[in-house]
Amino acid sequence: MADNIGNKAAHDYHLDVPAAQEGFYVKGAAHCDWGMKSRLARMFHPQSGNTVMLAFDHGYIMGPTAGLERIDLVIPPLIPYVDVLMGTRGIFRSCISPAARVGRCLRVTYDSTVLYDDMSNGGGFASDMENALGMGADCVAVQTFIGAAGESRSLELLCRTADAGARYGMPTLGVVAVGKEMERTEKFFLLATRVLAENGANIVKSYYCEGFERVAAACPVPIVIAGGKKLPELEALEMAYKAIQEGARGVDMGRNIFQSDSPAGMAQAIGKVVHEGYTPKQAYEVYEAVKNG
Ligand code: R5P
């Protein structure tokens, strides 16, 4: 073979340098496989270790939501300011460019719509793992209903998703639902977040509460907090700040960003809190500057 003639012989084995034993910065993932870590690293920023996820999946149970009437107009301009988009496959396909340089979290379960009193009473798979892989997802999200009618069914969906995720290196995000009947106490969130992690979630999405630092400490994987109903901007920034200071590894926030009078301002202000430790007041100045800019 012509290539063999004149080839340089390998010789530089650096015998005095130990092989690189890189640790891994995402909580609970040190023993995961390379593909899983690679996807987690597309979600959690390697410098801060945290993530800003932008949730716009509300239509899967609520139909058009205020601020999300035209997702194709509202969400793409925010992509430069966030780490991950969270949505359904129908919206990714129709409203988000496949070329977007951003992490993708795909919701893979459906539930009853708001027309039913109890949204936890049904539910199933909205997408299988092959579809998620085909869409280039970095993470799949499963809704769970701890303490409600759909608890057992939703935990089954979580476990099956975590099984497939382990096979294909796909992180599973377990979502803690807080329906009408569910508590929003430290006791509830301690239980719900831990149950999801123990059943295979690589990331847990939950809510900020009094005693959050104990909730975060007891959960062996990263917690990201949802924003919930729209708050005045400063209050939303205060909630995000307290959550990060008390152990959250990011936010998965929707209405407090896309329902703001300056979605780009809020996305950037939240990013400062999550990645750079800005105080609520400093971050509010960022929001104001973008809004008035
Ligand atoms: C929850 O499961 C929803 O579909 C949203 O993804 C979640 O509630 C986050 O959005 P928001 O910050 O508006 O509560």
Image (cartoon, grey):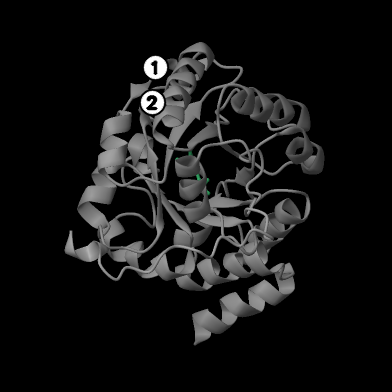
The residue lying at 25 percent from left, 67 percent from top is 5
Q: Position of residue 44 (x, y in %)?
A: 56, 54
Q: Quadrant of the N terminus?
A: bottom left
Give the class, few, some or many, for how many residues have Cα within 10 Å of label 2's Cα (few <14, many ≥20).
Answer: many
In this rendering, would 146 be left or right of 150?
right
Say the numbered circle drawn on residue 73. none
Which residue is under mark 1?
122
Name the foreground residue: 162 vs 282: 162
User: Does residue 55 appear to the left or right of 25 in the view shown?
Assistant: left
Query: In the displayed structure, does residue 12 sit left or right of residue 99?
Result: right
In the rendered image, the vertical position of residue 18 relative to residue 193, given as above or below: below
Q: CA distance from mark 2 to mark 1?
A: 6 Å
Q: Residue furthest left?
A: 2
Most foreground residue, 183 or 211: 211
Quick check: 227 left or right of 9? Answer: right
- Disc 1 residue lies near ligand 1 with CB under 8 A: no
Query: Which of the numbered marks, if any, corresponds to residue 111?
Result: 2
Q: In the picture shown, does residue 256 fall above or below 24?
A: below
Q: Position of residue 11 (x, y in %)?
A: 50, 64
Contact check, label 2 and label 1, Cβ < 8 Å: yes
The amino acid pointed to by label 2 is: Asp
Q: Nearer the viewer, residue 215 or 227?
A: 215
Q: Quadrant of residue 15?
A: bottom right
Q: Secondary structure at mark 1?
A: loop
Q: Position of residue 224 (x, y in %)?
A: 60, 46
Q: Residue at x 53, y 34 (%)?
A: 175
| Of the image marks 2 and 1, the number of the one nearer the N terminus | 2
Question: Eyeballing the image, is 233 above or below 203?
Answer: below
- The secondary structure type at the circle numbered 2 is loop
Circle 1: residue type: Gly
